[in-house]
Each structure stands twice: as C-alpha cells, then as structure tokens.
Image (tube, rainbow, N blue to C red):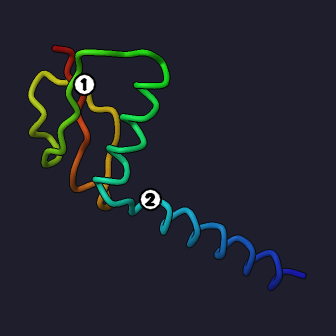
Amino acid sequence: MKKLLLGLGLFALAGSTFAAVKPCEELKAEIDAKLQAKGVTSYSLEIVEKGAGGGMQVVGTCEGGSKEVVYQRK
C-alpha cells in the first residue's frame, strides 16, 4: 500500500513538472484568445526574458520559467 501511494505521489509530481514546460508561442496564443473572448482591445503581448518586462504586467511564464509573457495596454 505504501509503494502504491508513493508511486501515485511521484506520478502526480512528474505530471505537474511536464505541464509547467509550455512553449511560449502556445501560451501567448492561449492568453490572446482569452483576452479577445473578454472583449479586450488595444493591447500587446510580448515574450521577454524573465525580469526584462520593465513596467509591463506579467501574465504568464513559459519554457520552464526562463521567459515571461507580458501584457501592455496601448
């Protein structure tokens, strides 16, 4: 029983790790679709290195946390 619980715990941990590594273009497209569905207009989404967004709002991280998707209203 302990081995089963340990195996399930490790499997869940590995699954969340794989889900965290998302390509930036895919994440940007998902965020863009959500913003358009909410009727948001006049904005830009950019992919930047982590911490290089300046004053823009970070709306997602991708490629294992090495890059960020930032939002800026125009």
Horizontally, is 26 left or right of 11 in the view? left
- Measured as percent of width and height from the top left, residue 51 is found at 14, 40
Relative height, residue 51 to residue 55 (above, below): below
Q: What type is the residue that disc 2 sits on? A: Ala
Image quarter where the C terminus lies is top left
What residue appears at the point 39 percent right and 36 percent down from the top-left corner? 31
In-front residue for pair 32/20: 32
- At a point 80% along the width and 85% down the height, the residue shown is 3
Marks 2 and 1 close (CB-CB < 8 Å): no
* Location of residue 63 (image quadrant): bottom left
Label 1: which residue? 57
For mark 2, give the secondary structure.
helix
Q: CA distance from mark 2 to mark 1?
A: 20 Å
**Amino acid at the residue labelled 1:** Gln
Residue bearing the label numbered 2: 20
Vertical comparison of 15 with 71: above or below: below
Residue 33, placed above or below residue 20? above
Q: Position of residue 18 (x, y in %)?
A: 48, 69
Quarter in which the N terminus is drawn: bottom right
Residue at the spot x=9%, y=28% of the render? 54
Camera-side residue of 69 and 37: 37
The percent coordinates of residue 44 (x first, y second) are 20, 27
Identified at 43% across, 35% down, the residue is 33
Residue 43, image quadrant? top left
Question: From this viewpoint, which residue is outermost toward the right?
Answer: 1
Q: Secondary structure at mark 1?
A: strand
- Check the image and report above or below for 31 versus 55: below
Q: Is residue 9 left or right of residue 43?
A: right
